[in-house]
Amino acid sequence: MSPYLNSILTLAGINILLAYSFYLPRGVGLLALGQAAFMGIGAYTCTILTVRYGIGFIPSLIAGGIIATVVGIVTGLAALRLKGLYLAILTMAFGEIVRVIVANTEWLGGVEGIFAIPPHTNLAAIVVAIGILMIFFQRTQNSRPGRTQIAIRDNEDVAEAFGVNIFREKVIAYGMGSFIAGVAGGFYAHYILYIEPGAFSFERMVEILMFCVFGGVGVYWGPFFGALTLTLIPEIFRFLSDWRIVFYGAVLIITMVLRPQGVIDREVIQKVQGFLFKVFLHKGRIGRR
Amino acid sequence: MIIQQIINGIILGSIYSLVGISFTLLIGVLHLLNFALGEVMMIGALMAWVILTFTGLNIALAVLIVIMATALLGVLMDVTAFKPLRRKKEYYLAPMISSIGFSLIFQEMANKYTGGVPVSFPENIVQGRIFNIGNSVFSSINVTVLGIALAMMMLLHYFLQKTKTGIAIRATSESFRRSRLLGININHIILIVSGIASMLAGLSGVLVGLTYGAISPFLGTIFVTKGFVVMLLGGFGSVHGAMLAGILLGLIEILSTSFLSTTYKDLWTFVLVIIILLFRPLGLFGTLPPVHRED
């Protein structure tokens, strides 16, 4: 694989992880717009552990995830009483607070950030991480926790009446989202090799949101597809180089008009499954009908 | 010194009020969170810059042209992107994403036009006449900005409270279905509200340009956040709330930077947001929760 393709796919992988960090809380109806901050917390923790304390990459990565989870759960306990747009704006404000504090802390490098981070991120590690997540999603889909989440997303009151501890489920989903964001942050830091508070600002969050809504948040293939496509589109359309961002904006608007539920939804998945089923189990039948 | 700061705070605050009102109108009536309003602001400021620099028209005419152009822009955005989504209620995230698409496009176009660097208004226009009241120094531009902002707010107040269209807008914000039953033409109301919201954003852009004397193509991003904060502080959908909240935010920002540390300037705003959300999520004057509403 060429180094160029490798590096693009690595970036796409990081973006897929970030998209999942939004998708998980979204699965219980939470609109969490602070994921960029958790990514930042993970990135800074991981970087400081590897650069200043010489700890190995994988333990640092997990430590970054854990710190992000702890912060997520502590803030979540206070914040998750809110719903909808209120929660969205609160998490957004939380994200900005984290960014401002980091930018003003000398020990964390201030506005300049931290330089000369060793390149530890490789595609294989990210693929493994995404693979674990996908298996997790596939396994929970039709299990008790998965169905509990769907119940909460569809109607909180009914779910509560059926004995679901909504608050607990929300804190768990939010915590897991923070963990993934933290890990993705660690990967990001050791891929870009330089971190500064601006990289974890609200613009990053908007990007994450776009991946998810473009791909669709109903099924777990949605964020995967969204992050992959939106990372690759600017690369594919390099010949448009001057107008790439305008094109990107237009793609978003048009997609939303045509498919507001995102490109991938349950129907698409079923069609693809049906197609694969035909191809692999009934060879040659297609087209002869 | 303190009086100077308070007046500066009010001037900045009145601009925040206008931005906040434009956000709150769209949320209150159309349940739409439009990120592109920040970029509409920037476009308004850029247009004013072009008019004032190259054509030699005066400020009043420039403001008039910008207002009309940005109102049209708002209507166009609504017709092309948000209207097709309005029937599909369950996808309330989708219009937000389209608005992000618009803001990418606008920002990039402006970025290309200006070359990515801030542009400055001509000296003779933004300097104005300087005069002193006591120890405080003001320029005639400050007074003009404050005057335009306050006049706009009063007009809007009159429009929403007294005119037939204004009352129809308020009815629509309570329930689409019931207003339709009462014979209100919802489609017209939607266009009017989109136009007004976008116009207010464009106007506040011009005022920002005049106050600071320079505008950058990335001006929108900063003010989107401020608009959210004002909208939240005043209560979703409350226009009067947004007016007061904007001025309050301006005062808080200016006073906190002059009396507390300047390094944490933006922090106080966000700390304020979190305090409001945790203890009074309806905002100072809000009455209706913005989501899960009937219709």
Image: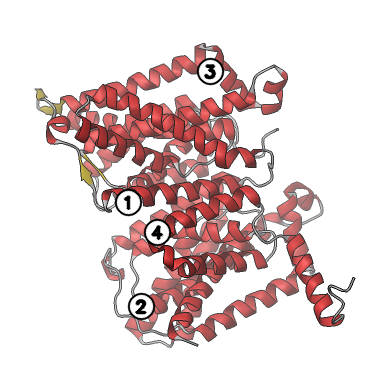
Q: What numbered label is drawn on residue B166?
A: 3
- Left or right, A275 with reference to B295: right
Which circle, 1 or 2, is nearer the viewer? 1
The nearer-to-camera label among 4 and 2 is: 2
Cβ atoms at labels 1 and 4 below 8 Å apart: no
Q: Which residue is mark 1?
A: B111
Which badge, 4 or 2, is on the more N-terminal residue? 4
- Distance from label 3 to label 2 (Cα)? 55 Å
- At label 4, which amino acid type do we have? Val
Work out how far the residue at label 1 is from the one at label 4, CA to CA, in angstroms.
28 Å
**Which amino acid type is marked by label 1?**
Asn
Q: Are marks 1 and 2 in contact (CB under 8 Å)?
A: no
User: Which residue is under mark 2?
Assistant: A193
Which of discs 1 and 3 lies nearer the camera? The answer is: 1
Farthest residue to the right: give it. Answer: A289
Say which element carries label 1: helix
Marked residue chain, label 2:
A
Residue B157 versus residue B91 in the image, above or below: above
Residue type (three-letter) at the residue carrying disc 2: Leu
Q: CA distance from mark 4 to mark 2?
A: 21 Å
Where residue A182 appears, as percent x and y from the top left, is 49, 70
N-term mark: 1 or 3: 1
Graded by Cα atoms within 10 Å as few (under 14), some (14 to 19) or many (20 or more), the crowding at tag 4 reads: many
Q: Is residue B200 visible?
A: no
Q: Secondary structure at mark 4?
A: helix
Q: CA distance from mark 4 to mark 3?
A: 41 Å
Pointers 4 and 2 in contact (C-beta within 8 Å): no
Q: Quadrant of residue B30?
A: top right
Q: Amino acid at mark 3?
A: Gly
**Is residue A141 visible to us here?**
yes
Q: Nearer the viewer, mark 1 or mark 4?
A: 1
